[in-house]
Image (cartoon, helix red, strand yellow):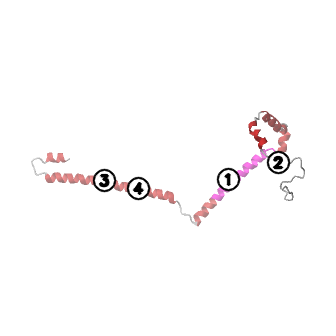
């Protein structure tokens, strides 16, 4: 830009013209920087305002709370009604214990069969019981009058 101004004004007094052109260009650059900064400030202000609104929320007043409470109660009542209908439907389709045993005769022996099958597969680690002899267990099975918690017995 300054080179262009210099070429146009060759042979004349051009210092004032070149300085004026440089000053105009610098003013344009400064204006652009100012506008960018102002736009950034506005953007930051808007972001901060949106963030503050997000965290601030709606102030709770008696009217706001009561309107929310009525909506909440109606929604909760609808959910309970729906749940009760589902329970009622499930109750109609569900058989009682007596009805189950009357319809399926294998139910009375199924637990025994399960226990027998499980009993065959149980493994016992006998090493856990090897030191049982070292324990000082009291033998009270032979004495019917033995009462360790009885304060009247005098074992001294």
**Residue 128 drawn at (x, y percent):** 74, 39
Q: Tell me the crowding category of disc 3: few under 14, some 14 to 19, or many 20 or more residues within 10 angstroms, Cα based.
A: few
What residue sits right under mark 3 in the picture? 33
- The answer to if 88 sits in the magenta stretch is yes
Query: Considering the numbered disc 3 on the image, is that residue within a helix, a strand or a loop?
Result: helix
**Image quadrant assignment for residue 75:** bottom right
What residue sits right under mark 1 in the picture? 79
| 4 vs 2, front mark | 2
Q: Earlier in the sequence, mark 4 or mark 1?
A: 4
Toward the bottom, the furthest residue is 62
The residue that appears at 31% across and 53% down in the rendered structure is 33
Q: What stretch is highlighted in magenta?
A: 72-95
Structural distance between the alpha carbons of marks 3 and 1: 59 Å
**Pointers 4 and 1 in contact (CB under 8 A)?**
no
Q: Which of marks 4 and 3 is nearer the N terminus?
A: 3
> Looking at the rendered structure, which numbered label has been put on residue 44?
4
Residue 125 seen in this snapshot: no
**Residue 38 drawn at (x, y percent):** 35, 56
The residue that appears at 44% across and 57% down in the rendered structure is 48
Q: Earlier in the sequence, mark 2 or mark 1?
A: 1
Structural distance between the alpha carbons of marks 3 and 2: 95 Å
Q: Earlier in the sequence, mark 4 or mark 2?
A: 4
Q: Quadrant of the C terminus?
A: bottom right
Q: Tell me the crowding category of disc 4: few under 14, some 14 to 19, or many 20 or more residues within 10 angstroms, Cα based.
A: few
**Horizontal placement of 3 versus 76: left or right?**
left
């Amino acid at each position: 830009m300054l080179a262009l101004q210099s070429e146009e004004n060759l042979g004349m007094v051009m210092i004032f013209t070149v300085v004026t052109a440089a000053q105009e260009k610098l003013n344009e650059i400064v204006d652009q920087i100012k506008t960018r900064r102002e736009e950034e400030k506005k953007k930051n202000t808007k972001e901060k305002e949106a963030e503050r609104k997000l965290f601030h929320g709606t102030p709770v007043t008696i009217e706001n709370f009561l309107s929310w409470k009525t909506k909440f109660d109606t929604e909760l009542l609808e959910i309970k009604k729906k749940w009760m209908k589902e329970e009622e439907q499930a109750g109609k389709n569900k058989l009682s214990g007596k009805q189950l045993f009357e319809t399926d005769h294998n139910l009375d022996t199924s637990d025994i069969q399960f226990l027998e099958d499980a009993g065959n597969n149980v493994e016992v680690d006998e090493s856990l019981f090897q030191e049982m002899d070292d324990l000082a267990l009291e033998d009270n099975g032979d004495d019917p009058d033995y009462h360790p918690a009885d304060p009247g017995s005098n074992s001294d």
